[in-house]
Image: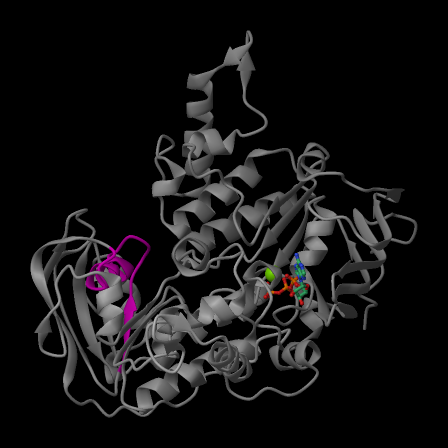
């Protein structure tokens, strides 16, 4: 067996090296004596549970965060970047987990941010536009360079973030869960580009929780646990089960639970729904109590938009939404929540969480108007804290400190806070849009069990997902969306990759 922890050729310094690097946050040792090296022309995956320290590590490499102790070397020379900008100017470019695009600017302005193409002292707008078109075309991202970023979906914003990284001169490219909200097709384009830069000798650090991506991309894998270096292995020397065991320190069973279907009354019925924006065009769907229905389709297919419209986040111009037999078309989210409709958005920053508020406030926010937390118009803090602790336990929040601000938690743990919110009041319809974005394998299993439990307890459950295995393994029934319409409805027996994929592109089932 090769020693994967060593640089390939003796004497040749690695592109990048971390020696005993630590990062202490108040009360949390996020990184604890971490060791790591990156070779030119390799994809090096960082693998570890939510909160293991992956993002902290790349924040240090990319100049966003300063280490408390330890050494960083680039091509054998000591290195320390004072800022992300400085790192970028030295060829170290990062696509962060939480985006750094500027919402008020256009796509092209974001692409050239900090390095505007100048000619004779003013911006060469035309050249910028041409280059923006060229990059987006190379990536196969269908984005209008003139669009304002704030108006884009989460997936589209992620595309901007990625395109920006590929625009600069690279020697190290860092990608923190870059495919979290991309569809398979967009992800494949990204993988092809990673192959390209790799062939040019760029070293790529890639963070993902998805096995498929590790299999497709990884040359070596470094496993972290609790901020510590566990091991570095050659990707060809390790099985998936071994990786999960290394990551968690234990054996993890099957990820997908067997969820029993027991379809009862129709809880949600949508007829001929068309949204003002045209994102949904005359769609019909029904969701029954005791079943889990999957909504699949590409970004922009209408799979997310139909539920956003049902929950009052997009305006319907025709058609009806009926909840428990009552017409609730174009009602406010607040009233729908009171009527027993819970909607979990895919973007925890924009519509989901108040990042500077505590987890407790974020989790109990949905139930402040009901007992036991409400006491007249006052909030019962003791009950609120008890409730937050119960939820934190149930979803294994790590660290178990619901009193802390959401922004101090790792990406996967923020996701748990969002999930917890839906548990605080009586609900008959749960809609989860991309419920496992950014969560580790163990947590993913916990979230599926949790969703399955809601369904088996008699709730109607909708899972909207661009992660096909999620639809294949969980759904009792699936609707596939294309161009704002329901392209097909599949019963359990017909749900397979072969039958769903053609529908994504507007074809009919094989
Ligand atoms: N600004 C901060 N203040 C306090 N603690 C922090 C801060 N940022 C991160 N932490 C803590 O550091 C630890 C490592 O977090 P990090 O974000 O690096 O995890 P991760 O491996 O990227 O996880 P995920 O897979 O969920 O993204 C966690 O316990 C987290 O709560
Ligand atoms: Mg992270």
Question: What residue is drawn where x is 51% and y is 87%?
Answer: 254
* Pick the front one: 311 or 403: 403
In this orientation, does residue 219 appear?
no
Question: What residue is drawn where x is 68% and y is 51%?
Answer: 59
Point out the quarter of the image occupied by ligand 1.
Answer: bottom right
Q: Quadrant of residue 68?
A: bottom right
404 in relation to 160, above or below: below
Q: Quadrant of the C terminus?
A: bottom left
Q: Which residues are magenta?
A: 292-313
Q: From the viewer's perspective, tell me whether residue 360 is left or right of residue 366.
A: right
Q: Position of residue 191 (x, y in %)?
A: 52, 53
413 in relation to 193, above or below: below
Residue 79 magenta-highlighted: no
Question: What residue is drawn where x is 48% and y is 33%?
Answer: 110
340 in relation to 456, above or below: above
Judged from this view, the residue extending furthest toward the top is 120
Q: From the viewer's perspective, tell me whether residue 13 is left or right of residue 196.
A: right
Q: Position of residue 219 (x, y in %)?
A: 68, 61
Question: What residue is drawn where x is 58% and y is 45%?
Answer: 196
Q: Position of residue 50 (x, y in %)?
A: 61, 70
* Pick the front one: 449 or 352: 352
């Amino acid at each position: 067996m090769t020693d994967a922890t060593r640089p390939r050729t003796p004497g040749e310094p690695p592109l990048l090296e971390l020696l005993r690097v630590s990062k202490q946050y108040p009360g949390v040792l996020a990184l604890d004596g971490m060791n790591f090296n990156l070779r030119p022309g390799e994809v090096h995956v960082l693998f570890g549970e939510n909160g293991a320290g992956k993002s902290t590590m790349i924040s240090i490499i990319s100049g966003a965060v300063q280490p408390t102790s330890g050494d960083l070397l680039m091509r054998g020379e000591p290195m320390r970047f004072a800022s992300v900008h400085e790192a970028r100017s030295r060829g170290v470019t990062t696509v962060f987990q939480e985006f750094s695009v500027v919402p008020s600017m256009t796509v092209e302005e974001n692409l050239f941010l900090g390095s505007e193409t100048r000619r004779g002292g003013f911006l060469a707008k035309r050249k910028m536009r041409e280059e923006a078109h060229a990059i987006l075309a190379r990536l196969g991202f269908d984005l209008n360079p003139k669009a304002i970023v704030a108006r884009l979906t989460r997936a589209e914003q992620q595309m901007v973030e990625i395109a920006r990284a590929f625009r600069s001169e690279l020697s190290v490219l860092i990608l923190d869960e870059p495919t979290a909200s991309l569809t398979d097709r967009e992800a494949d384009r990204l993988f092809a580009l990673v192959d390209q830069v790799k062939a040019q000798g760029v070293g790529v650090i890639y963070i993902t929780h998805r096995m498929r991506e590790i299999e497709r991309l990884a040359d070596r894998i470094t496993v972290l646990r609790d901020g510590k270096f566990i091991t570095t292995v050659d990707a060809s020397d390790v099985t998936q089960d071994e990786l999960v065991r290394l990551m968690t320190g234990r054996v993890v069973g099957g990820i997908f639970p067997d969820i029993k279907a027991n379809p009862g009354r129709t809880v949600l019925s949508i007829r001929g729904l068309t949204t003002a924006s045209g994102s949904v065009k005359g769609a019909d769907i029904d969701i029954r109590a005791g079943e889990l229905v999957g909504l699949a389709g590409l970004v922009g297919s209408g799979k997310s938009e139909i539920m956003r419209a049902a929950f009052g986040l997009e305006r319907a111009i025709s058609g009806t939404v009926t909840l428990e037999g009552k017409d609730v078309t174009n009602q406010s989210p607040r009233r729908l929540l009171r009527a027993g409709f819970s909607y979990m958005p895919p973007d925890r920053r924009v519509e989901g969480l108040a990042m500077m508020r505590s987890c407790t406030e974020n989790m109990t926010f949905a139930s402040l108007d009901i007992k036991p937390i409400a006491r007249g118009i006052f909030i019962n803090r003791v009950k609120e804290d008890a409730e937050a602790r119960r939820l934190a336990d149930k979803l294994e929040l790590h660290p178990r400190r619901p009193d802390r601000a959401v922004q101090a938690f790792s990406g996967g743990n923020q996701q748990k806070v969002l999930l917890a919110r839906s548990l605080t009041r009586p609900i008959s319809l749960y809609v989860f849009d991309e419920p496992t974005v950014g969560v580790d394998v163990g947590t993913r299993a916990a979230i599926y069990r949790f969703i399955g439990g809601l369904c088996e307890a008699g709730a109607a459950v909708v899972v909207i997902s661009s992660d096909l295995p999620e639809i294949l393994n969980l759904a009792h029934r699936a609707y596939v969306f294309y161009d704002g319409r329901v392209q097909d409805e599949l019963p359990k027996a017909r749900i397979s990759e072969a039958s769903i994929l053609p529908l994504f592109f507007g074809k009919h089932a094989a």
